[in-house]
Amino acid sequence: MNRTEQTKRALLEAMEQSLGVVTTACRKVGIGRTTYYEYLKTDPEFAAAIDELQNVAIDFAESQLHKQIADGNATATIFFLKTKGKARGYVERQEVHNMGDKLFTINVVEPED
């Protein structure tokens, strides 16, 4: 395995450990962000591996969100319903009302029929 391939492998491990934070992973491996983006642009296998790591990071974040919901965190619950519960009618809309020379913005959250 040549040096570039070793660097890419180390970078993939660092990206996994940093949950996809490019700067952190690059510092750990000792390369610049420009090199990372060059690998991403020119190596389809590397790019596919990075995409998969991004999905792992999203899975981790979702698991943390679910823990907060289970702990009774109302903000986490509302966020989840506004993003994942749209098909069940949990939507937020914004209304703007013109009252003469003043504009008022009202956020309305309500289940749709």
Image (spheres, rainbow, N blue to C red):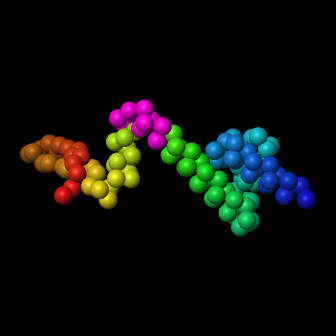
Which residue is farthest left?
100
Q: Is residue 31 magenta?
A: no
Q: Is residue 69 magenta?
A: yes
Quadrant location of the C terminus in the rendered image: bottom left
Image location (x, y in percent) of residue 17: 70, 42
Image location (x, y in percent) of residue 54: 61, 53
Image quarter of residue 45: bottom right
What residue is shown at x 80% (from left), y 53% (from top)? 9
Magenta-colored segment: predominant secondary structure: helix
In this orientation, which residue lies closer to the viewer: 91 or 26?
91
| Left or right: residue 27 compared with residue 69 | right
Quadrant location of the N terminus in the rendered image: bottom right
Specify whether residue 32 is in view: no
What residue is shown at x 80% (from left), y 49% (from top)? 10
Magenta extent: 65-75
What residue is shown at x 29% (from left), y 56% (from top)? 88
Image location (x, y in percent) of residue 27: 75, 41
In this orientation, which residue lies closer to the viewer: 80 or 24?
80
Which residue is farthest front?
70
What residue is shown at x 36% (from left), y 36% (from top)? 75
Specify whether residue 107 is in view: yes
| Left or right: residue 48 compared with residue 81 | right
In this orientation, which residue lies closer to the viewer: 20 or 110?
110
Count of labels shown? Answer: 0
Image location (x, y in percent) of residue 93: 25, 51
